[in-house]
């Protein structure tokens, strides 16, 4: 750990974020205007031509499309290119590192190994091993280092090799990452992204099948988003990096190999906007992450049975997009929430409370919530399936709601 901290101190001494790199695009580095910043562990700084000017004070809200402008699917732009979800995350991260020299990455094996799921593959040779910093197995330490770097003007992306490991950094995420902007009286911003794989995989065992949404939702100051497609993975990654708020980006371990065609041109999604996956009339189904695909599988059965479900991927876990959700509730008057999070204290509980508080008069039936069972995730595959929501349960719940 000492070696990494010394490297961080060296970097901060070598590069004054207010004077040398970040004051303006024209003054970022002498003679390297519009270049990619490469910072190596021996202190050498070099630039590579990128043909782009730097944008210094970008925040997510400035880059959000309006509802009318946001493409509804990645196929709207032609020809586009196909990417797996983990490749889309990498492309978004790489574009932001090209655009803004303040963006850096840190975490276990993110450098020359390329990350445990290869999201950062190829970034260390391109940007140097101080912009892509391999850390010791010390989550609390490198998360705190990232938060400190954000306080000085950098925009770190902190990878948890598994989201369950970030429980070791909960003190840093809660007391520092979420609260420092408030407790400093606005003197510090914490533009940090915390990301990594989580969720129930295939026989990964209880400790590697954590869903930390319920842990982080109660921390003031944090934003939380969950990606579910290559298209929104890239768009949310870029928006999270540009945000001046700390953002937790949840990635599901079983979705990394999803393939989709995404636009060739640059796009950035809004961090606080849900996605209408399937319009319908009879019932609103709210979901996110991997459960989106269980819901869509159930929707095929429901259509064959004469039901017309409206499916919304909420994407923003904190805050909720109550505009999109509310309009759907006013239309269907019935709500089913499907999540992989635990039932007790999960996202579904908070979402149900928000709907009751704001749209009670529009409900014609009690809100139903399907969640994972409140048990440690078993290792045995058959038992593992029993702990999470399956499509047949979704079909049965909709039939009950619509009676």
Image (tube, grey):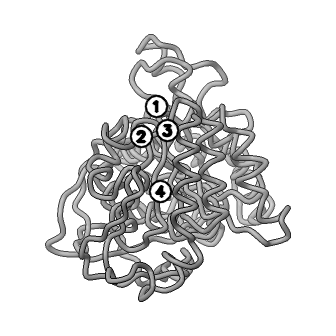
Q: Given this view, does label 3 or label 4 mark the residue nearer the observer?
A: 3
Q: How far apart are marks 2 and 3 (CA)?
A: 36 Å
Q: How far apart are marks 1 and 3 (CA)?
A: 38 Å
The residue beneath circle 4 is 311
Q: Nearer the viewer, residue 360 or 192?
A: 192
Q: Tell me whether the residue at label 1 lies in contact with that at label 2, contact meaning CB atoms closer than 8 angstroms.
A: yes
Q: Tell me whether the residue at label 3 lies in contact with that at label 4, contact meaning CB atoms closer than 8 angstroms.
A: no
Relative side of 350 to 225, left or right = right
- The C terminus, quarter of image: top right
- Tag 3: Cα neighbours inside 10 Å, few (<14), some, or many (≥20)? some
The residue beneath circle 3 is 135
Q: Earlier in the sequence, mark 1 or mark 3?
A: 3
The residue beneath circle 1 is 390
Q: Which of marks 4 and 1 is nearer the N terminus?
A: 4
- The N terminus, quarter of image: top right
Q: Distance between the residues labelled 1 and 2?
A: 7 Å
Helix, strand or loop under label 1: loop
Q: Which residue is drawn at 74% across and 65% down?
A: 359
Q: Which of marks 4 and 2 is nearer the N terminus?
A: 2
Q: Where is residue 278 in the image (x, y as percent from the top left)?
A: 41, 61
Q: Tell me whether the residue at label 4 lies in contact with that at label 2, contact meaning CB atoms closer than 8 angstroms.
A: no
Q: Where is residue 268 in the image (x, y as percent from the top left)?
A: 42, 73
Q: Which residue is drawn at 46% across and 39% down?
A: 197
Relative side of 215 to 265, left or right = right
Q: Tell me whether the residue at label 1 lies in contact with that at label 3, contact meaning CB atoms closer than 8 angstroms.
A: no
Q: Distance between the residues labelled 4 and 1?
A: 16 Å
The residue beneath circle 2 is 294
Helix, strand or loop under label 3: loop
- Tag 4: Cα neighbours inside 10 Å, few (<14), some, or many (≥20)? many
Q: Given this view, does label 1 or label 3 mark the residue nearer the observer?
A: 3
Residue 286 seen anywhere in this rendered image of the structure: no
Q: Nearer the viewer, residue 171 or 218?
A: 171
């Amino acid at each position: 750990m000492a070696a990494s901290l010394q490297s961080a101190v060296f970097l901060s001494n070598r590069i004054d974020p207010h004077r040398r790199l970040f004051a303006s695009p024209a003054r970022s580095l002498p003679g390297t205007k519009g270049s990619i910043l490469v910072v190596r562990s021996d202190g050498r700084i070099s630039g590579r031509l990128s043909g782009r000017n730097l944008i210094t004070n970008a925040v997510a809200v400035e880059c959000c499309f309006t509802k009318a402008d946001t493409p509804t699917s990645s196929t709207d732009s032609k020809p586009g290119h196909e990417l797996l979800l983990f490749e889309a995350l990498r492309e978004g991260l790489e574009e932001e590192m090209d655009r803004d020299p303040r963006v850096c990455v840190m975490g276990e094996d993110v450098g020359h190994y390329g990350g445990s799921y290869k999201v950062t593959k190829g970034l260390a040779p391109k940007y140097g091993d101080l912009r892509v910093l391999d850390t010791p197995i010390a989550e609390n330490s490198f998360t705190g280092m990232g938060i400190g770097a954000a306080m000085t003007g950098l925009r770190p992306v902190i990878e948890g090799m598994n989201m369950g490991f970030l429980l070791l950094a909960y003190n840093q995420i809660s007391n520092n990452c979420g609260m420092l902007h408030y407790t400093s009286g606005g003197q510090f911003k914490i533009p940090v992204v915390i990301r990594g794989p989580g969720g129930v995989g295939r026989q990964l065992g209880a400790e590697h099948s954590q869903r930390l949404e319920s842990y982080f939702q109660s921390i003031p100051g944090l934003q939380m988003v969950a990606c579910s497609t290559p298209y929104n993975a890239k768009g949310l990654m870029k928006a999270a990096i540009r945000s001046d708020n700390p953002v937790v980006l949840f990635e599901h371990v079983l979705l990394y190999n999803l393939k989709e065609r995404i636009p060739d041109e640059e796009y950035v999604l809004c961090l606080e906007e849900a996605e209408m996956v399937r319009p319908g009339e009879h019932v609103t189904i709210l979901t996110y992450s991997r459960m989106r695909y269980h819901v869509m599988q159930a929707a095929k059965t429901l259509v064959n049975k004469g039901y017309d479900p409206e499916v919304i991927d909420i994407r923003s876990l904190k805050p909720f997009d109550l505009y999109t959700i509310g309009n759907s509730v006013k239309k269907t008057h019935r709500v089913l929430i499907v999540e992989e999070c635990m039932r007790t204290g999960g996202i579904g509980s908070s979402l149900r409370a928000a709907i009751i508080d704001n749209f009670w008069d529009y409900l014609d039936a009690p809100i139903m919530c399907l969640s994972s069972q409140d048990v440690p995730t078993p290792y045995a595959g058959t038992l593992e399936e029993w702990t999470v929501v399956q499509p047949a349960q979704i079909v049965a719940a909709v039939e009950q709601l619509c009676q």
